[in-house]
């Protein structure tokens, strides 16, 4: 049984990775419905929370059916991170997660995200202060290191555990790699082999099939896996992995009716949460992913991304369901 503090996650939990402009409540809703065991908000700027920026504040929105859920924070200033952790605690998540892994230039060049991998003493101090300021479990998501010559994750894991974090998620790439090449889980496995480590260790990077989830579970001994890009437009990845781990059999892929239903649920939630205009606009990035590999779908996709209203989108989705009703996908 994997546990974060008193939060029981099951024998081998599947975590939804926090992804900017993706892991909002509408997306999380369809992932939860399909078996995600622990989810996180999009990462939230500590400076944005302190300034009371509307976009940052909205990211604090969580719903009871999502639990357990963590709020993920990033920033480069220790005082600001502590203050933002206090604000996030008041939003009543189940845990606070610190982002020490985001590789994008706009974050790292501000001394946040993966940049902290270049200053382990500051990372440890920041984490310790956040652990002290909140009554919630604190977890961390990070990478193997800054580059090939500074893969310091083994030291990082011990030092962060020693100052009180209660779980660690590790993406199997360095910051310099960004998302290129193949994720290397070797050091993640070595963390699990360390007899000093007693907190849950979750592996992240390239889990895109039930077979790979089982292979990495067995090979590296992780307590669970975190899934990011493979869940975009395909929340069924969670149920498929669970079925494969339970039975050794592949679950049937989602039918077209299920794809349309999930798209509608995601879209309707987007409208409720973001409003008509923004809900319609921001949903456009998801249609390609929900209907990936569907034959001759391009004309429908073009109509969906050009549809101006909720009613127009819903009518096109109904047409999609009817057109592909007898087609195996």
Image (cartoon, helix red, strand yellow):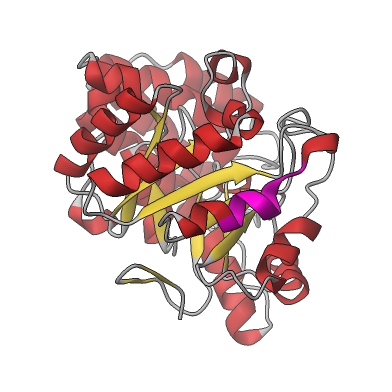
Look at the image and tell me in which quarter the C terminus lies.
bottom right
For this view, does 187 lie left or right of residue 84? right
Q: Is residue 154 magenta?
A: yes
Q: Is residue 30 above or below residue 125?
A: below
Q: Nearer the viewer, residue 220 or 59?
A: 220
Q: Nearer the viewer, residue 259 or 100?
A: 100
Asked whether the viewer can see residue 326, the reply is no
Asked whether the viewer can see residue 162, the reply is yes
Q: Which quadrant of the view contains residue 190?
A: bottom right
Residue 32's spot in the image, x, y percent? 38, 57
Residue 121's spot in the image, x, y percent? 55, 36
Residue 58's spot in the image, x, y percent? 24, 27
Q: Is residue 103 above or below residue 292?
A: above
Q: From this viewpoint, which residue is outermost toward the left?
A: 90
Q: Is residue 58 above or below residue 204?
A: above
Q: Is residue 170 magenta?
A: no
Q: Nearer the viewer, residue 12 or 319?
A: 12
Q: Which residues are magenta?
A: 151-158
Residue 201's spot in the image, x, y percent? 57, 63
Q: Is residue 72 above or below residue 329?
A: above
State the predominant SS element of the stretch in magenta: helix
Q: How many marks?
A: 0
For this view, does 211 lie left or right of residue 92? right
Tell me which residue sits at (53%, 72%) in the image. 198
For this view, does 176 lie left or right of residue 279? right
Look at the image and tell me in which quarter the N terminus lies.
bottom left
Tell me which residue sits at (52%, 67%) in the image. 200
Q: From this viewpoint, which residue is outermost toward the bottom?
A: 247
Tell me which residue sits at (57%, 71%) in the image. 223
């Amino acid at each position: 049984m994997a546990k974060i503090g008193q939060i029981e996650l099951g024998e081998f939990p599947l975590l939804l990775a926090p992804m900017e402009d993706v892991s909002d409540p509408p997306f999380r809703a369809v992932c939860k419905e399909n078996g995600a065991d622990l989810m996180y908000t999009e990462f939230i700027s500590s400076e944005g929370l302190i300034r009371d920026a509307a976009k940052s504040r909205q990211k604090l929105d969580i719903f009871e059916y999502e639990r357990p859920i963590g709020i993920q924070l990033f920033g480069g200033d220790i005082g600001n991170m502590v203050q933002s952790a206090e604000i996030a605690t008041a939003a009543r998540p189940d845990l606070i997660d610190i982002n020490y892994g985001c590789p994008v230039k706009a974050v790292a060049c501000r001394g946040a995200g993966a940049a902290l991998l270049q200053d382990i003493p500051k990372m440890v101090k920041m984490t310790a202060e956040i652990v002290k300021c909140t009554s919630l479990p604190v977890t961390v998501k990070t990478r193997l290191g800054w580059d090939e010559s500074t893969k310091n994750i083994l030291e990082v894991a011990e030092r962060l555990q020693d100052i009180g974090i209660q779980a660690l998620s590790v993406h199997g790439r360095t910051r310099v790699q960004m998302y290129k090449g193949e994720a290397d889980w070797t050091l993640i496995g070595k963390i699990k082999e360390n007899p000093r480590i007693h907190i849950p260790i979750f592996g992240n990077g390239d889990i895109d099939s039930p077979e790979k989830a089982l292979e990495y579970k067995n090979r590296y001994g992780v307590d669970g896996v975190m899934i990011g890009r493979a869940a975009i437009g395909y929340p069924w990845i969670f149920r498929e992995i669970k079925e494969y781990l339970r039975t050794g059999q592949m679950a049937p892929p989602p039918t077209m009716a299920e794809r349309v239903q999930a798209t509608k649920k995601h879209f309707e939630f987007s409208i409720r949460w973001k409003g008509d205009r923004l809900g319609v606009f921001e949903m456009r990035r998801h249609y390609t992913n929900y209907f990936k590999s569907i034959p001759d779908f391009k004309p429908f996709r073009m109509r969906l991304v050009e549809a101006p209203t909720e009613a127009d989108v819903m009518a096109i989705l109904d047409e999609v369901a009817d057109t592909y009703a007898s087609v195996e996908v």
